[in-house]
């Protein structure tokens, strides 16, 4: 199977990586449109978006999803659904304006997904099976998306190059995050490319060998 094309677009002052995937028919999915929707629409010129996916409910990942859904639906003449994350992040999705005010940011709004996602389900998108895996710790309802055929994992704020996601929130859980990374991500082949929510991509093998949060105990 031909791997999907991929582009990372850094959005919002927090510079979160919105990921655009598309196939040879120029159909696309957008993962974590945190904001800067005008810029994202420019990047999507010539593409038909089939769905918007969310890894978790933080403003820099989900703050532009509602606006993007509305504008794409109007432009394409058919509904563009927002899918995910796990419903345990509903409280974050419903308070994005409050999150934005806390950081002094504007232009991000709360969003109600068309459907929450569950651990172990498979989304058939762009001719690929996208596996959903629940990986809490950074947020309670965080999910990651695995495209086995393309050899990629879109992991939001769970795993980064030589570090892991923050857990210093009232709802954070460091032990759950590390256990989830070991179970849900380190079980993937070493060559799997990890598309992180911030910063540059890495691979499962690189993090297995050199991530100080994961090397201990392996």
Image (cartoon, rainbow, N blue to C red):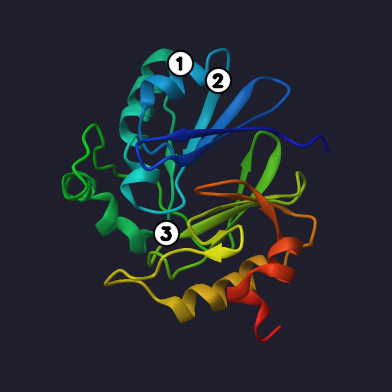
Position of the C terminus, as image quadrant, is bottom right
Q: Give the left or right position of residue 208, taking residue 76 as reference.
A: right
Q: Which residue is mark 1?
A: 76
Whether 39 is drawn above or below 155: the answer is: above
Whether 94 is drawn above or below 43: the answer is: below
- Whichever of labels 2 and 3 marks the residue nearer the N terminus, that label is 2
Determine whether label 2 and label 3 are within 8 Å by CB.
no
State the SS at label 2.
strand
Q: Which residue is mark 3?
A: 86
Residue 100 makes an appearance in the image: yes
Q: Residues within 10 Å of mark 3 (few under 14, many from 20)?
A: many
The alpha-carbon separation of the residues under discs 2 and 3 comes to: 25 Å
Q: Kindly identify the residue that appears in the image at 32 percent across and 34 percent down.
A: 66
State the SS at label 1.
helix
Q: Which residue is mark 2?
A: 48
- Whichever of labels 2 and 1 marks the residue nearer the N terminus, that label is 2
Q: Kindly identify the residue that appears in the image at 47 percent across and 63 percent down.
A: 165
Q: Report x, y in % for residue 82.
A: 41, 39
State the SS at label 3.
loop
Q: Quadrant of residue 217?
A: bottom right
Q: Report x, y in % for residue 145.
A: 59, 52
Q: Residues within 10 Å of mark 2 (few under 14, many from 20)?
A: some
Determine whether label 2 and label 1 are within 8 Å by CB.
yes
Q: Kindly identify the residue that appears in the image at 44 percent across and 46 percent down.
A: 54
In this rendered view, identify the residue nearer to me: 79 or 92: 92
The alpha-carbon separation of the residues under discs 3 and 1 comes to: 27 Å
Q: Kindly identify the residue that appears in the image at 36 percent across and 44 percent down.
A: 60
Q: Report x, y in % for residue 9.
A: 51, 32
Q: Quadrant of residue 71?
A: top left
The alpha-carbon separation of the residues under discs 2 and 1 comes to: 7 Å
In this rendered view, identify the residue nearer to me: 15 or 72: 15
Whether 166 is drawn above or below 44: the answer is: below
């Amino acid at each position: 199977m031909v791997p999907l094309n991929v582009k990372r677009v850094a959005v919002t002052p927090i510079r979160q990586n919105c990921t655009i995937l598309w196939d040879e028919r120029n159909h696309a999915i957008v993962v974590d449109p945190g904001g800067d929707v005008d810029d994202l629409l420019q990047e999507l010129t010539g593409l038909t978006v089939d769905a918007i996916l969310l890894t978790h409910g933080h403003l820099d990942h989900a703050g532009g999803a509602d606006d993007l859904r509305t504008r794409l639906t109007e432009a394409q003449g058919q509904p563009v659904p927002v899918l995910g994350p796990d419903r345990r992040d509903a409280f974050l999705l419903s308070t994005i304006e409050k999150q934005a005010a806390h950081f002094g940011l504007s232009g991000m709004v709360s969003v109600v997904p068309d459907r929450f996602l569950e651990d172990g389900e498979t989304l058939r998108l762009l001719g690929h099976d996208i596996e959903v895996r629940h990986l809490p710790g950074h947020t309670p309802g965080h999910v990651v998306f695995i495209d086995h055929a393309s050899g990629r994992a879109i992991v939001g704020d769970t795993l980064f190059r030589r570090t892991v996601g923050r857990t210093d929130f009232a709802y954070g859980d460091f032990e759950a995050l590390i256990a989830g990374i070991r179970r849900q991500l380190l079980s993937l082949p070493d060559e799997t490319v990890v598309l992180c929510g911030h910063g540059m991509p890495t691979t499962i093998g690189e993090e297995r060998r050199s991530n100080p949060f994961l090397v201990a105990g392996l």
